[in-house]
Structure formats: structure tokens, C-alpha cells
Image: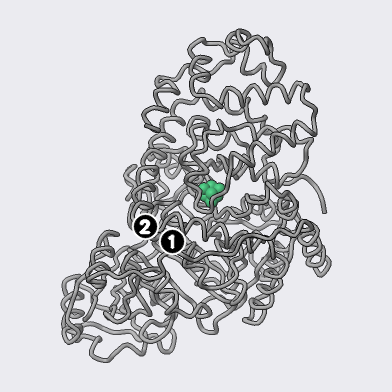
């Protein structure tokens, strides 16, 4: 056991440095702005349709708090229910253990290829890489995951991992990697190309791997929420299904889903309901997989649970609304966060899962925010992200001491993000260091703050200033 | 394996040493909602997903099935063995799923006809539970065209009302429109891996 937690990517620079690099990529910013602007507007109307939205949010948060406060009881209950219905439950303390369990199960089936439904938990533990090292090819079947996989890329969003790619870039990736490339860059043609590319795999592959959005402790029912039907294919056609689930994904009983099946689709894809939701309990003879394995994953979750303020991050239902409204995310993109969990939720979840105060990159994440509070406002389970960010910053300072170069640099970055005007002036001035010096407190920032302060490295002034952007989007 | 289980449960208990006592769950949200015309709302919301939807009189269902299939030029249809006899309109080769159809057969049919277990008007959702007139899950998944008959008494207005009618231990599939994706620039386009055409007859 042991080893580093793959939830953050090895070799990623700390956030200020990575953000700086990303800010130079105008195509990325344009793609992101287009996508997030569209979805923000749609989410607002989907939410406005429900007069009881705030009550649903409060109930969602309270249900999850109950789950967390009694997690041991619910875990055991879930295990019993799944087992009673013919499933097999496995427990994994960390990524390495989960990967080994899954690889052993795949090998026991004699398979050298598996189909996968998009899953944050398996991305978090680096399952695809572990399977590959063990001689098993994992085929991602979600369109955005497929784009990332075929493009040898990294994800940048928790719902749409290829959000940083526009249609023309997607067409190029598909042209390079598909036997039957798409006819054009029209989304319909791109979807059609993905359908043809994966059809045979779905019909022939014997083992599928999925994540889970929810699992009902009372009944052992597991829920996967999706759009394309790739999830249904993976959950229904193969002989063996392996589901990897973070241990906080539990809800106590079936009626609790009436809350989450309203909160999740409207918050994530801004739909009244996503196209497909599958619910299964163990094994059903004559219908679907004959073997079902559920892997319950800790990987830093119990460490997160131990923090009284930080534990609320475990309420997250991975809707991605907080990413879509975040001004910092919109400008830096997801990859700057160096984790499969980017954006506001990543800034509070990734460092807690890593749980290592000496990990510079993870320690920089709580500073990747302006504390503007937009994330808290949209979060369907009312996670007070600014509160957790501030709390985690305090822990970083405690671990490092206030005056260490890293702490000073991070604090400067945070200070700058915290105010749209500061950011704008810093960019207009062309040199953050000059601006900071005028303040009289920080005249020269050591690395990695120096990356921000040397005029050579300061991000190119974007066409639209931060403030103008802010005004246009926040009213 | 056992020690992982024991260790994780011990970690959970240690993490909860402060004995958090969260506030009770208040369910003051709207569990049911009344609308003047639930069927009308369902029809409107299903259509919003770019599914094809028709409101028909119960006695007309067989006739409308025949008409829809003829309009599409479908000649072979998979069907759960227990759909009402009159649904199997003449002029079409019906392949009942008994004994179970092979995957390749299912991949080759022109479509599938099923009933459903419940529908949610507010969200335009149809729920299948592998019960009467629905068959196993892959039946409504592999064919590219799904024709589904919903009875008016199966329509619930809200999500909570619908969940209360369902049995969670059955294999459930919630269907809201044809297969779609939001993965290209966060904009919904229809037609990926599941049936690319969903047609619904709501009978009353
Ligand atoms: S933190 Fe809240 S808004 Fe962000 S992904 Fe999680 S549930 Fe959604």
C-alpha cells in the first residue's frame, strides 16, 4: 500500500504557474467561454422552473450530511443489500488497492479489453493506466472521454472532460484516430462517428467498468446518470460489470433519490432530466450482467471526513455547476489545476484527498479562487466552497509557516484573484510585480510567485479585460 | 480483503470522533404537484427532447402503431413476448423476445415496441422496469428506433410521485428523449449510442 495519490498529476506545476501558462492560450479561453456561457444561462432557466429549488438544495445537503455522519452504518447496510442480491462487494483503501482489485477481476474473466462508462472515481485512481500496465486495454465510451483518450490528452472538466476542445479540434482528433472518420465538424456527424467507432465494442466486450452516481444503502440499488446510452450499453450487455464507487456516494433509501434526480440534471447539463438513468440491484437473472462487483473506494475520503469544516466537500454530487460559474476556471481551464477534479470543487477536494501538507501543488489549489462565492450559490448540495477554501489556506499556512516563499507567493496569487479590479490593473500594468510593489508590502515575489511577477512572464493582456468580462457575466 | 474493510470502517469511525449531529432532513419540498393536464404536460415535455409524441385514444393504439411503422417503413420489430396481442400490427414481422433474441438479431431489427412502468410529466421521462410489456433492458437499447406506449394512468406529475410508484430492486431505465450528448461545446445534440429515434404514443 502507499505511494502517491494519483488524484493529482505527477509533475504538474503549482496552480499559479500552470494558470499563467494556460492564460496564454487564447483558443482554450475562447472554447471555455463559449461552453460555460451557454450552460450558465441554461442552468439558470432549468433551476428557475422549480419553485422549491432552495428546499430541494437544503434537503440534498441534509441527506448527504446524514450519510456522512453515519457512514459506517450505511456502508455496512449497502454491502449487505448488494450481497443479498447477488453482487460482490470489495473494499479499497487507496488507488493502488482499487486498481489491483479491478485488474484481478478482469484477469479472472480472461479479458484483455474492457469498455468503460465515464467515471470520476476511476479517473481519480488512474485505473486506465494501471490496467494498461497489466495488459488490459480500457476503451472509454463516453464521447468526451473518448476525445481525451484518442487525443492522448488530459481531462479539464468533471462532466465534459474535453470541454477545452471545440468541434474543429474534435474532428481533427477523430480523423487521426478513427477507421471511419467523421464527415464534418458538425456535432451530429461527430456523434455519428463515435457511434460507429464503438458499436462493435459494445456488442462484443465481455467486461465493463463503471462508476456510480448514487447507491441506495437500503436496497443495494446503484444508479448511473448519463446521456448517450454508452452507459446503458456497458451496464446491460457485458457478462461482468465492475463498478468503482467513492464511499460517500451513498444515499440511505430510495425516496432520497427524488431529491437528487431533480438536483443533478438541472445543475449539470441544465436539463429537466438527462436522457438515461439506469438503476440496478445486484444481479437480475436473464437481464444484464451475470456477475456484478462493487468496489468501495476510500483513497483519502476518510481523511477528508475527519476535517470538520472540509468534510462538506464529500457531499459533492459532481454536477460541475461550480466549474461553469467560476471566473478563475473560465480563464485558466481545468488542466491548470493538475487534477481530475478541477475548478472550485477540485480546489477543495483534491488537496484533501491528497492529504499531504508537503505536496506543493496540492497545497496551492486552495488559492486558485477569487472567493467570489458564485460556486456556493449554484451548488445543489450547498457546499460552502469559500469557507472550505479559507479553512484549507489556513491549514497550509499552519503547515508551512506564514513567511515561507511558497506561502507568500500563494497568498499573493490569491490576493490578486480575490478582486477583479486588482487582476485587471495588474494585467494592464503589464507587470504584477510593479503593481504589488506599489502596495508596499510585497516588492518582489520568490518562486513560484516570481513567475507572476517578472514582466516577461506576465500573461498577455487578454482582448477582453477581466473586469469587463466580470461585468458582462455578473451584471 | 477483510483487513481493508475493517480498516476503512475503523478510519470512518475515527474520522467521526467528534460525533457530528447534523440537523434532521426536512422534506418540505413539493412531493406532488397538481397540473390541469398531466398527459398534455408529458406530451409537451417529451417533445422538447426532440422525441416524436402522439396523444391517442386507447382504442386506437393498434391502428396508430401500424400507421407509425408504415410511415417509417419498418418491416421487422422486436417485441417483448407479453405485449398486448393487438399491438402486433399486420404487415410487420414481429420478433418476440422468447426465446431471447441474439444480440446480432436485435442489432438488425428495424425497431422495438414496448410499454412502460411509469412516466414523469414534468420532466418528459418514461421509466421501464422490465415488467409487463417491457422485456429485458437490452431490448429497448440496441435497436435504433424505440416505439413506446404510455397509458394515461401511468403518468405521474413530479419526480417524487413517480419514484413512489417504482420498485428500486427491479432493473430500471429512465428515458428522457432519444440518446443525446452535451459533450461538444456543452450543447445537446441527439443521437449517439442508444436509440436515435424515440416515438411515444400516450393513450387515454
Ligand atoms: S461542489 Fe457542488 S456545484 Fe461543484 S460539482 Fe460538487 S455538487 Fe456540483
Residue A199 image position (x, y, % from top left): 44, 62
Give the crowd class for mark 1: few <14, some 14-19, many >=20 residues within 10 Å: many
Q: Is residue A202 above or below residue A342?
A: below
Q: Is residue A322 left or right of residue B121?
A: right
Q: Do dots 1 and 2 share one subunit?
A: yes
Where is residue B19 drawn, in percent x and y? 75, 60
Residue drawn 61% across the image and 51% down it: A123
Residue A443 in view of the camera: yes
Task: Say if residue A182 shows up in the picture.
Answer: no
Question: Label 2: chain?
Answer: A
- Is residue B38 found left or right of A120 in the rendered image? left
Q: Quadrant of the C terminus of chain A?
A: top left
Element class at badge 2: loop
In percent of the image, x 39 and y 61: which residue is there? A273
The disc label shown at residue A262, or none: 1
Identify the mark at residue B26; answer none if there is no mark. none
Whether the residue under disc 1 has CB within 8 Å of ligand 1: no
Q: Earlier in the sequence, mark 1 or mark 2?
A: 2
- Asked if A216 appears above or below A427 in the picture, the reply is below
Q: Position of residue B142 (x, y in %)?
A: 40, 70
Badge 2 crowding class, 10 Å Cα cut-off, few under 14, some 14 to 19, many 20 or more, is some
B172 vs A467, nearest the viewer: A467
- Provide the residue designation for mark 2: A50
Q: CA distance from mark 1 to mark 2?
A: 9 Å
The chain ID associated with circle 1 is A
Write down the quadrant of residue A431 in the picture: top right
- Front position in the image: B176 or A25: B176
Quarter of the image with the N terminus of chain A is bottom right
Query: Element type at marker 1?
Result: helix
Residue farthest toward the bottom in the current orientation of the protein? B85
> Does the residue at mark 1 contact the one at mark 2 (Cβ under 8 Å)?
yes
Amino acid at each position: 500500500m502507499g505511494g502517491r495519490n494519483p488524484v493529482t498529476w505527477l509533475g504538474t506545476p503549482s496552480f499559479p504557474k500552470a494558470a499563467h501558462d494556460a492564460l496564454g492560450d487564447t483558443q482554450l479561453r475562447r472554447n471555455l467561454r463559449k461552453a460555460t456561457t451557454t450552460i450558465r444561462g441554461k442552468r439558470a432557466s432549468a433551476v428557475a422552473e422549480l419553485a422549491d429549488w432552495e428546499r430541494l438544495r437544503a434537503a440534498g445537503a441534509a441527506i448527504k450530511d446524514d450519510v456522512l455522519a453515519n457512514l459506517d452504518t450505511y456502508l455496512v447496510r449497502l454491502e449487505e443489500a448488494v450481497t443479498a442480491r447477488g453482487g460482490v462487494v470489495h473494499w479499497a483503501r487507496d488507488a493502488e488497492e482499487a486498481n489491483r482489485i479491478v485488474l484481478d477481476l478482469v484477469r479472472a474473466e480472461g479479458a484483455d479489453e474492457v469498455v468503460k462508462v465515464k467515471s470520476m472515481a476511476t479517473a481519480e485512481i488512474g485505473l486506465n493506466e494501471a490496467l494498461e500496465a497489466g495488459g488490459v486495454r480500457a476503451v472509454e465510451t463516453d464521447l468526451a472521454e473518448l476525445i481525451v483518450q484518442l487525443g492522448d490528452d488530459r481531462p479539464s472538466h468533471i462532466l465534459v472532460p474535453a470541454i477545452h476542445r471545440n468541434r474543429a479540434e474534435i474532428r481533427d482528433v477523430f480523423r487521426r484516430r478513427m477507421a471511419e472518420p467523421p464527415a464534418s465538424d458538425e456535432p451530429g456527424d461527430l456523434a455519428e462517428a463515435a457511434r460507429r467507432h464503438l458499436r462493435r465494442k459494445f456488442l462484443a466486450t465481455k467486461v465493463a467498468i463503471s462508476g456510480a452516481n448514487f447507491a441506495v444503502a437500503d436496497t443495494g440499488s446503484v444508479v448511473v446518470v448519463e446521456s448517450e446510452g454508452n452507459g446503458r450499453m456497458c451496464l446491460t450487455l457485458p457478462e461482468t460489470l465492475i463498478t468503482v464507487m467513492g464511499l460517500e456516494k451513498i444515499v440511505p433509501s430510495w425516496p432520497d433519490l427524488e431529491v437528487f434526480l431533480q438536483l443533478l440534471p438541472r445543475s449539470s447539463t441544465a436539463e429537466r432530466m438527462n436522457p438515461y438513468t439506469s438503476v440496478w440491484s445486484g444481479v437480475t437473472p436473464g437481464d444484464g450482467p451475470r456477475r456484478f462487483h462493487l468496489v468501495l473506494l476510500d483513497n483519502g475520503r476518510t481523511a477528508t471526513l475527519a476535517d470538520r469544516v472540509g468534510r462538506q466537500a464529500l457531499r459533492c454530487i459532481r454536477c460541475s455547476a461550480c466549474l461553469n460559474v467560476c471566473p478563475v476556471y473560465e480563464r485558466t481551464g481545468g488542466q491548470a489545476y493538475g487534477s481530475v477534479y478541477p475548478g472550485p470543487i477540485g480546489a477543495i477536494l483534491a488537496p484533501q484527498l491528497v492529504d499531504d501538507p508537503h505536496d506543493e501543488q496540492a497545497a496551492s489549489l486552495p488559492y486558485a479562487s477569487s472567493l467570489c462565492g458564485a460556486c456556493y450559490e449554484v451548488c445543489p448540495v450547498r457546499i460552502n466552497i469559500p469557507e472550505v477554501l479559507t479553512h484549507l489556506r489556513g491549514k497550509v499556512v499552519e503547515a508551512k509557516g506564514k513567511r515561507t516563499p511558497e506561502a507568500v507567493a500563494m497568498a499573493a496569487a490569491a490576493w490578486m484573484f480575490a478582486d477583479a479590479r486588482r487582476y485587471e490593473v495588474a494585467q494592464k500594468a503589464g507587470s504584477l510585480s510593479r503593481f504589488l510593489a506599489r502596495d508596499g508590502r510585497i516588492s518582489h515575489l520568490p518562486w513560484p510567485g516570481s513567475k507572476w511577477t517578472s514582466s516577461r512572464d506576465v500573461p498577455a493582456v487578454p482582448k477582453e479585460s477581466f473586469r469587463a468580462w466580470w461585468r458582462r457575466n455578473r451584471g | 480483503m477483510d483487513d481493508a474493510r475493517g480498516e476503512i470502517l475503523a478510519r470512518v469511525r475515527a474520522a467521526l470522533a467528534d460525533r457530528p449531529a447534523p440537523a434532521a432532513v426536512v422534506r418540505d419540498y413539493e412531493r406532488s404537484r397538481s397540473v390541469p393536464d398531466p398527459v398534455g404536460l408529458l406530451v409537451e415535455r417529451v417533445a422538447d427532447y426532440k422525441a416524436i409524441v402522439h396523444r391517442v385514444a386507447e382504442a386506437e393504439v393498434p391502428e396508430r402503431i401500424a400507421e407509425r411503422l408504415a410511415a417509417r417503413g419498418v418491416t421487422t420489430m422486436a417485441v417483448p413476448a407479453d405485449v398486448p396481442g393487438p399491438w402486433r400490427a399486420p404487415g410487420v414481422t414481429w420478433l418476440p423476445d422468447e426465446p431471447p433474441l441474439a444480440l446480432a438479431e436485435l442489432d438488425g431489427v428495424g425497431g422495438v415496441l414496448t410499454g412502460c412502468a411509469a412516466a414523469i410529466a414534468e420532466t418528459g421521462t418514461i421509466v421501464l422496469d422490465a415488467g409487463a410489456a417491457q422485456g429485458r433492458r437490452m431490448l429497448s437499447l440496441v435497436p435504433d428506433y424505440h416505439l413506446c406506449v404510455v397509458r394515461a394512468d401511468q403518468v405521474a406529475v413530479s419526480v417524487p410521485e413517480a419514484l413512489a410508484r417504482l420498485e428500486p430492486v427491479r432493473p430500471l431505465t429512465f428515458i428522457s428523449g432519444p440518446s443525446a450528448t452535451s459533450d461538444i461545446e456543452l450543447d445537446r445534440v441527439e443521437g449517439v449510442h442508444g436509440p436515435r429515434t424515440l416515438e411515444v404514443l400516450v393513450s387515454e
